[in-house]
Image (spheres, rainbow, N blue to C red):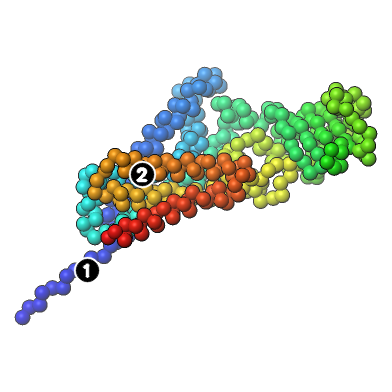
Amino acid sequence: MKQAPLPRRVRLAPLGHYTRYVLLAYLRQVVLIVLVLWIIALTIDLWPQMDNITQACHSGTTRCVVRFCLLRTPRLIGPLVPFMTFLGVFVTELMHTRSGERTLFFNSGRSPAQSLMPALLLGLCLGPMDVALDAWLGPASMAVQMKERIGRDGQRLDRARESNLNWIVLRDGLLSTHVVQTGRPVLTQLEFFRFAGPGQLVQVVRAASAEQVGQSNVWHVKTGRKWQSPDGIARLSMSDALTGNAMAPFTDMDLQLSLDPLWLSVIGMEVQYVPFRVLLALSGREAQGYRDAPYRTQLHMIIAEALLPGIMAVLAAALAVTFLAYGARAMIAGAVLFVGYLAHSAIRACALLGESGDVPPILAAWLVPLLAIATVILVLRREKRRR
């Protein structure tokens, strides 16, 4: 007697037809959303400075504008990659729900947790791209803009022009100066107030310029006036300090200033535009004249960005396949979309808090990703208990 054939064992393939089909759908939506938001962001960024750009053109206007758009792209798109990933996954899952494909996927025996492989692969694709945009392409494109003095930011951050006035707190005093980059940082129109203790002013130096001597903390100061009281007993009135009365003139002198020349080369520049090698150096050495919180925060944010698109993709997929699997009610869809926007806003807010020193840099970079992962775990456990 012939025996009935044993039923074929069904196994889920991580890189099977479902994964490839959904991953391609995710990528199509992400590319479409990137194009739409890129056009909107470029319009907002380009419109106020169009005259400035066209006047700086030495070749064809159209070519110059297109080139400038490409130079601005890394800075405009980089911060939005995690949110655009969330939107791409959310829109795709919404379309699958409305077409009935999500029900078909579930009827094949695939649980919500097993439906996350395409989102994970999407994160593996977009994570390195996000890191490249923020760590290398963004600073490199800004370096070109500064060198060619094209656009508002390129002219504002031009290293060859005198910077705005900077007040720098040093270990032993307070420095007011402008900075010009001529191969090496040069201090101009500087005023230095040295203190021997709280409220004990012992030296005031006003000079036209100062240059660093070798790699030391000694700066050669030229053409200025000084006042000095080694014991801090003699008093200098504020009016005398401001007008230069009671201050002896000098032609040149050496002055001890604990300043980091590498930091002076990027002074006044937003951390997003600082070259990655400089960012690594400033975040890993003793801070001299600057706060290292912005640089350490940016470094941790770049590291987190390797995983952030994947985390946002998994968050969108978990929420969609759990709450929008059998119907796309407007209230629930809006709530899922709000969660993604809230995560995006929280990432930006944490970055600002980290740069200001109100939150530790590592916490600023990893708080939102960890909360997103915890949300995914809770949602999947809740769905598993329901089943």
Residue 10, can we see it?
yes
Residue 209, can we see it?
no
Q: Residue at x 54, y 36 (%)?
A: 141
Rendered location of residue 139, percent (x, y): 57, 39
Which numbered tag is attached to residue 301?
Answer: none
| For marks 1 and 2 on the same chain, the one whose residue lies earlier in the sequence | 1
| Residue labelled with disc 2 | 336
| Residue labelled with disc 1 | 9
Give the CA distance from mark 1 to mark 2: 36 Å
Furthest toward the bottom, the residue is: 1
Crowding near pointer 2: few (<14 within 10 Å), some, many (20+)? some
Say left or right for 337 vs 353.
Answer: left
- Residue type for callout 1: Arg
- Residue type for callout 2: Val
Label 2 residue SS: helix
From the image, state whether disc 1 or disc 2 is nearer to you.
2
Crowding near pointer 1: few (<14 within 10 Å), some, many (20+)? few
Say left or right for 324 vs 1.
Answer: right
Rendered location of residue 316, percent (x, y): 37, 48
